[in-house]
Image: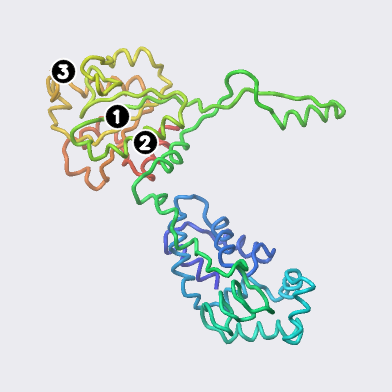
Amino acid sequence: MLIGFFETLRRAGVPVSLKELMDLLAGLQQQLVFADMDEFYYLSRAILVKDEKHFDRFDRAFGAYFKELNDLEGLLEALIPDEWLRKAFERELSDEDKARIESLGGLEKLIEEFKKRLEEQKGRHEGGNKWIGTGGTSPFGNAGYHPEGIRVGGESKNKKAAKVWERREFANLDDTVELGTRNIKVALRRLRRFARTGAADELDLDDTITSTARNAGLLDIKMVPERHNAVKLLLFLDVGGSMDPHIRLCEELFSAARSEFKHLEYFYFHNFIYESVWRNNLRRHQERVLVADVLHKYPQDYRVVFVGDASMSPYEIVQPGGSVEHWNQESGEMAVRRLLHTYEKAIWLNPLPRQEWGWTQSVGMVRQIMEDRMFPLSISGLEQAMARLAR
């Protein structure tokens, strides 16, 4: 039965391996769950899924495979091995429960009837007075009203349990859908290089234990500086014009970057970078920062991220005076190449889907300037971009 579930996951695009399937079987043999679909869902997801971006695919595959429970007997046999069925029942039943089930002929008779109904039942059941399921007055199942019986999964609260795998709470984590602040943070965390800086005000537990042991048990506390992400980032954001439809996405990226990077500097530009950029869009014409000053102020160990759709007239990239806002003495290409010469680790994030890049000549020109270091602003694209910056 679990082989079919395993194959369903593989077809759904969840990268599970035979080793993980064997781990799941071992977990069932160790009695980590007992005839409870919700517990089985959490256990199987924890073992089989190694990246949260695949949670939604797992939920869809799980729901599709188990929705009708066409193989209820096989499922319960996997969750309730014969060798420990009796022990599990005895452990769950109190002395009062054991006295009550005497009306059915004792525990032996109850277990025998339980197995008999498993063989007869062909699907999921809810309500009624005979089959194993939820609600109703059957002596087997959960959330029902029969005074003597065996609870199979769930909680005895007389209410229908919500199936978490049908809620699809992780839909926004799939790398094929639009980004959100939370999943942007997850992707940005791939660009981390921790270093200990500042005062020694954090307990070093391992060193404290080792030092105390060497000191014949006399407590010897060791402190270390707090760890911080040492990566430094320069963020250049395109604003206005064709970027207006992507405002919310850029806001989420900016919010996530500010929370993930202690050393973050950001600037704005319109369409393409020329001799100057700015930090306040309300005073963009009065308070501008020269690109030359950026190069002198921030050292070469900074990473650079450009964010823009790269959609413009080709003249705006290669011609002096090509800017639509002012007369630029040198081409935007020269300004960007000067940045790339100083900051070797740089990438360009494009909010347009990759399949649309070929529609605009300027996108291809920017890709060429960036030496093909342009990535779509999606979860998978952001992960690839962070991996490139981390080299």
Q: In which quarter of the image is residue 205?
A: top right
Question: Amino acid under label 2?
Answer: Leu
Who is closer to the viewer here, 162 or 343? 162
Is residue 155 rendered to the left or right of residue 210? left
Q: Quick one: label 3 or label 2, which is nearer the N terminus?
A: 2
Q: Name the residue under label 3.
A: 328
The answer for how far apart the CA atoms under marks 1 and 2 are is 10 Å
Dots 1, 2 in contact, CB < 8 A: no
Check disc 2 and report its element: helix, strand or loop. Answer: helix
Dots 1, 3 in contact, CB < 8 A: no
**Image quadrant occupied by the C terminus:** top left
The answer for how far apart the CA atoms under marks 3 and 2 are is 29 Å
- The image's mark for residue 12 is none
Residue 141 on image: x %, y %: 61, 75
Is residue 315 rendered to the left or right of residue 33? left
Give the residue at x 80% y 73%: 95
Residue 379 on image: x %, y %: 38, 44
Residue 77 on image: x %, y %: 62, 75
The answer for how far apart the CA atoms under marks 1 and 3 are is 19 Å
Give the residue at x 41% y 24%: 264
Q: Quick one: label 1 or label 3, which is nearer the N terminus?
A: 1
Check disc 1 and report its element: helix, strand or loop. Answer: strand
- The image's mark for residue 253 is 2
Q: Is label 3 or label 2 in front?
A: 2
Question: In this picture, is 102 found above or below 23?
Answer: below
- The image's mark for residue 237 is 1
Question: Amino acid under label 1?
Answer: Leu
**Image quadrant occupied by the N terminus:** bottom right
